[in-house]
Amino acid sequence: METMLNPAPTETATTTAPESATPRTCVLAIDDNTDFLQLLKDLLEPCGYEVHTAINPVKALEVFQRDKDKYKLVLLDYYMPQLDGAKTFEWLRKISPNVKVIVCSGADELRLRQIQAQHKINAYIHKPFRVKEALETISRVNRQPVHGSN
């Protein structure tokens, strides 16, 4: 049976990615749920990703602005206080048009597809997610060639 994960503090995952990240791929994870951020670190770091986390999207954008060439992938919650995912995404792409962005959200599937089409995000992961599927999505997006701005 495949494991489903919610951002609960007591859950742990013991799985490996279907394919490891390229060496030291740096990921910025932005989510207002600290347990979910820790879960992402626990899942991705054993797969070769360097994961930096931020609970405040405004502060995350400051970090991203300072180190924009460092981050190749951003995992972004869509519904957050201070600044929602849509505005955060717009700022990420203004700062670095080629950054790859995956929205992680508990929104229904139809809404996630609308978000992907409207904002031209690289992919989305529906919360709660299956570990294997989430890791495959992250790996696939990470391997995508960098194109010009969308």
Image (spheres, rainbow, N blue to C red):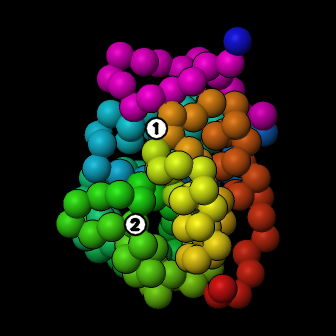
x and y, in percent, of residue 116 in the image: 61, 67
x and y, in percent, of residue 75 in the image: 50, 55
Give residue 9's mark: none
Amino acid at the residue labelled 1: Lys
Would residue 3 appear left or right of 80 to someone viewing this image?
right
Residue position marked by numbered label 2 in the rendering:
85
Query: Residue 126's quadrant in the figure?
Result: top right
Query: Residue 83's quadrant in the figure?
Result: bottom left
The residue at 71%/58% (across/down) is 141
Q: Is residue 82 above or below residue 142?
A: below
User: The residue tagged with tag 1: helix, strand or loop?
Assistant: helix
Q: Residues within 10 Å of mark 1 (few under 14, many from 20)?
A: some
The residue at 79%/70% (across/down) is 145
* Observer-nearest of 42 and 2: 2
Examine the rendering and report whether any part of residue 72 can be seen. no
Q: Residues within 10 Å of mark 2 (few under 14, many from 20)?
A: many
Instruction: Find the distance from the CA under tag 1 to the CA under tag 2.
Output: 20 Å
Residue position marked by numbered label 1 in the rendering:
41
Which mark's residue is nearer the viewer, 1 or 2?
Answer: 2
User: The residue tagged with tag 2: helix, strand or loop?
Assistant: helix
The residue at 61%/19% (across/down) is 3
- Quadrant for the N terminus in the image: top right
What range of the chain is rendered magenta?
2-18
Amino acid at the residue labelled 2: Gly
Query: Residue 149's quadrant in the figure?
Result: bottom right
Q: Magenta includes 42?
A: no
Majority SS type along the magenta span: loop
x and y, in percent, of residue 21 in the image: 69, 46
Examine the rendering and report whether any part of residue 122 can be seen. yes
